[in-house]
Image: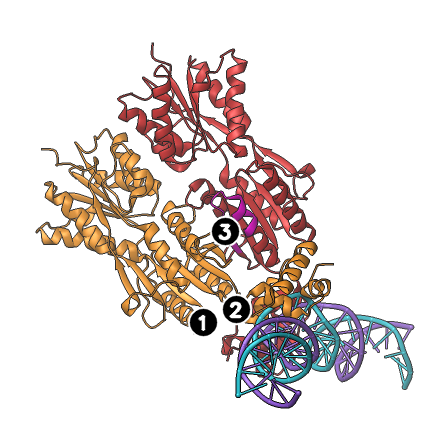
Chain colours: A red, B orange, C cyan, D purple
Amino acid sequence: MTVTLADVAARAQVSPATVSRVLNGNYPVAASTRERVLRAVDELDYVLNGPASSLAAATSDLVGILVNDIADPFFGIMASAIQLEIGGPGGRAGGERLAVVCNTGGSPERELTYLTLLQRQRAAAVVLTGGAVEDAPHAAAVAAKLRKLADAGTRVVLCGRPPTPDTGAIALTFDNRGGGRELTEHLIGLGHRRLGYIAGPEERTTTRHRLEGHRAALQAHGIEEDPRWTVYGRYDRQSGYEATLELLRRDPSLTAVVAANDSVALGACAALRDSGLRIPDDVSVAGFDDLPFSIDAVPSLTTVRLPLSDAGARAGRIAMGREEPPPGGIATIRGELMVRGSSGGPRE
Amino acid sequence: MTVTLADVAARAQVSPATVSRVLNGNYPVAASTRERVLRAVDELDYVLNGPASSLAAATSDLVGILVNDIADPFFGIMASAIQLEIGGPGGRAGGERLAVVCNTGGSPERELTYLTLLQRQRAAAVVLTGGAVEDAPHAAAVAAKLRKLADAGTRVVLCGRPPTPDTGAIALTFDNRGGGRELTEHLIGLGHRRLGYIAGPEERTTTRHRLEGHRAALQAHGIEEDPRWTVYGRYDRQSGYEATLELLRRDPSLTAVVAANDSVALGACAALRDSGLRIPDDVSVAGFDDLPFSIDAVPSLTTVRLPLSDAGARAGRIAMGREEPPPGGIATIRGELMVRGSSGGPRE
DNA sequence: AGCGTCACAGCAAGCGCTTTCTATCTGATG
DNA sequence: CATCAGATAGAAAGCGCTTGCTGTGACGCT
């Protein structure tokens, strides 16, 4: 029923081995023979059986990209850049690889299961994007899995994720702490002394690092932080909205709100507006990531730009072995402070 | 080196067949035996060889989701919903399937290549999301591919994409024409008579349908359209920005701008503001899709809400055979007009 | 002329799993 | 107590491809 290699071989009057070699192009085949084979492939509309080929060759052309939330452009942009380099069809790379993105939804279990599934498929490479969860047992489980993948020859790259020592994984980490610090220092420089902070989910590394940067800035400037000034939430707009109302309730005298990311910042803006406050006249707002929509906010958002696309591209190339991993297997990628209209001096 | 089924069998003192049956759970195995096998699996840290298993069983647990632009939440939201139903790990479904999303970047060739790759992997199902490209040869090629996939037992579902007759694909189509018409009628109802339209890429079905709806509305109300009022672009913010400036240049007397989608509308808003025009006092703006950020725009965006999440979930269930396909294999999903602050009566 | 060298092409042995068919054992049944 | 159905377990035949090794002419070299 389905056409197999043997059928093609018969039609082209060669052995299956020859057909395989033509298709894989890693063994000399006379031009005339090759052409005959290719014609047969075409005439029969033959499609290679992936599983069979992977089984025999003990490798596959699958590359997995794990993201926390596929509906969030933060991940979409990285995934897109990675995929382009991995070479999915038409990408910059030549080979035809099946670069696939897997949505973990931020759940540790799903992350682990996806890794197993990819291991099962004998994936050629795996790229994990975004922050990790800081639960110790889970972190250990993931590390063990990554080590096993690496041992089995799968290249493992972390993009925008802290390093996992002793796993053989290459890490391209974002300097969330530095960015957070720079951002808050900008606000302090403008004269703000009472700053609210809307954090992401408490157990994420990204959340912790950004918050640490924020606090480092406060401390460096002798500002004592009021515990009421920090609210944890999710990395989405609604969370920012609610958290802002909560902050306002706790301390109406805040003059600035720093958000865990741009979506949260947008929600914060909405909440402030709905509360009758002007931005930045009454309250300044800052985000993080500099996603495309941030510049369109009104006023446009002061934030920290992360080179998502570049980082993704680099991670992709490393995953494909087309670029040298950074020395020590770890590189830190810095963000860039983007000062825009949403931040200004505090009201009197 | 790597642990195989046979190793597990040896350790559990059973035959490989039994281990396989325990793992697949589709054949009676005595509880005590099962337990022994499971323990061996655990002790050896055994991971099934996916390719081998797919080869032997002639099926795989891979499900492909094709999207035009993974960095666009329009697709991210659908993909996320689909994936949840497909049952990637932790999803609503039980089985562990590898639901993977493939980013075509809107390129017909990549779309085709991904379909071939998926066919090669003997994917269990494929979901294609978003508008199609209207190039005849390409459309034919895709149709042929879909037919072949369907013939090979792969379930094919289109989500937010027009039907492809005779391919065996189930289609869940968005009523872009109806939505476009309703939106423009709303604007006309407010008194607008000179409406600019920023369309998407000319060759996309989505673009054409939305534009047709817009024109139908104009025509129904006896408004003769000026060809200068339509500009084609991409489905992104920047395109909206540029197109709006162009529209303004062509005819400064426009009182409303209808955009191909929300991102474009956001760009339009920015361009209007930068041109010193107020929204909606000077010019009304309308989008399409109702993505999460639309409500946060200032003023919030009048748009047509598409139930992306519901549609994706339904497509996912159909792809998994857990929901009956609609009669005739085609269902049309309607949008809902969301009237918000960005639209108002025209200026005098 | 004799022989080592190439450049190709084919043989055949798996890769690790699934599944059909068959064998065995158990307890129930007449 | 013989017989049989039912419940499990095993043997073995592939699934479709890759690849190490083995030919086999043709060619060039001494």
Res A93 seen here: no
Q: Secondary structure at mark 1?
A: loop
Subunit ID for the residue under disc 3: A
| Towards the viewer: D5 or B261 | D5
Name the residue that disc number 1 marks: B153
Quadrant in which residue B195 is drawn: top left
Q: Which residues are magenta?
A: A99-114
Query: Which residue lies at the image location 30% right of the left edge and 41% below the top edge?
Result: B240
Subunit ID for the residue under disc 1: B
Q: Are marks 2 and 3 on the same chain?
A: no
Instruction: Answer whether labels 2 and 1 touch (C-beta < 8 Å).
Output: yes
Query: Which residue lies at the image location 21% right of the left edge and 30% below the top edge?
Result: B278
Residue B243 position in % (x across, y down): 28, 42
Q: Quadrant of the N terminus of chain B?
A: bottom right
Query: How far is the residue under mark 2 from the one under mark 3?
Result: 21 Å
For the residue marked with disc 2, what is the amino acid? Thr
Q: Are marks 2 and 1 on the same chain?
A: yes
Query: How far is the residue under mark 2 from the one under mark 1?
Result: 9 Å
For the residue marked with disc 3, what is the amino acid? Val
* Above/below status of A25 relative to B282: below
| Towards the viewer: A194 or A6 | A194
Name the residue that disc number 3 marks: A101
Residue B156 within the segment the image draws in magenta: no
Name the residue that disc number 2 marks: B59
Query: Which residue lies at the image location 51% right of the left edge and 75% below the top edge?
Result: A42
Q: Secondary structure at mark 3?
A: strand
Q: Quadrant of the C terminus of chain B?
A: top left
For the residue marked with disc 1, what is the amino acid? Gly
Query: How far is the residue under mark 1 from the one under mark 3?
Result: 24 Å
